[in-house]
Image (cartoon, helix red, strand yellow):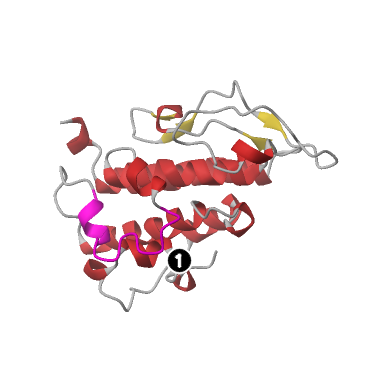
Amino acid sequence: MEAMELDWKRRVNTVKGTAHALSYLHHDCVPPIVHRDISASNVLLNSNWEPTVSDFGTARFLNLDSSNQTIVAGTIGYIAPELAYTMVVNEKCDVYSFGVVALETLMGKHPKDILSSLQSTSTGDDVKLCEILDQRLPHPTFSVLQDIVVIAIVTFACLNPNPCSRPTMKSISHCFLSQFTPFNISLFHISLQQLISQELTHYLKL
């Protein structure tokens, strides 16, 4: 029942609202703020289903004149992989965590299996995007499916193992505010491998 209440339109708005909030923290605050614990449990919905980023207990101001080295903080399953060996926190750590939350929102469950196989070049060859969407919900309408595809493309860009190749939250926020012409590819034939290899990012302004 709860899954049905959080329908596709509300899920799309949750992902977009979270992106706008993180863009504000990273690019409109002086000094920039890195949350360090973006997870599904720290994105709260109010009575109007509007998202709010919560729990700033591990948040850090970014010092542009420092290496920003720190101990690893955050929720297991959402922490950017590079933190395990660099111990350097920056805004791209939040970008990765946002990607996990966005994918979890689309799937209706934590995407641990997908995350663990992102290094494989053959992952998702035969798996279609529509197959991993939360099957408890009715199939999305065409217009909402367009939004879902945009979110999916953005999500896998955020999950890039190389933090330098991840988009900024500002570019993601702008992307979500842009108007898109319909994709000239079949939305029902987009594979996970296309998303993982990021061959579809040229459709977006990231």
Q: On the rendered structure, is 50 left or right of 20? A: left
Using the image as rendered, state which of residue 196 and residue 30 is in the foreground.
196
**Mark 1, other Cα within 10 Å: few <14 / some 14–19 / many ≥20:** some
Residue 191 lies, in percent from the top left, at 29, 65
Instruction: Please name the predominant secondary structure of the magenta segment in the image.
Output: loop
Magenta region includes residue 5: no
Q: Is residue 204 above or below residue 69?
A: below
Magenta region includes residue 125: yes
Which residue lies at the image location 53% right of the left edge and 23% below the top edge? 55
Residue 49 lies, in percent from the top left, at 34, 35
Residue that mark 1 sits on: 198
Disc 1 on helix, strand or loop? loop
Quadrant of the snapshot with the C terminus: bottom right
Residue 124 lies, in percent from the top left, at 30, 60
Q: Is residue 162 above or below residue 1?
A: below
Using the image as rendered, state which of residue 91 and residue 47 is in the foreground.
91
Using the image as rendered, state which of residue 195 and residue 185 is in the foreground.
195
Which residue lies at the image location 40% right of the left edge and 32% below the top edge? 40
Residue 121 lies, in percent from the top left, at 41, 63
Which residue lies at the image location 35% right of the left edge and 49% below the top edge? 114
Q: On the rendered structure, is 135 left or right of 116? A: left
Which residue lies at the image location 50% right of the left edge and 34% below the top edge? 38
Where does the magenta region start and end? Answer: 118-133
- Amino acid, disc 1: Gln
- Residue extending farthest right: 65
Number of numbered discs visible in the structure rendering: 1
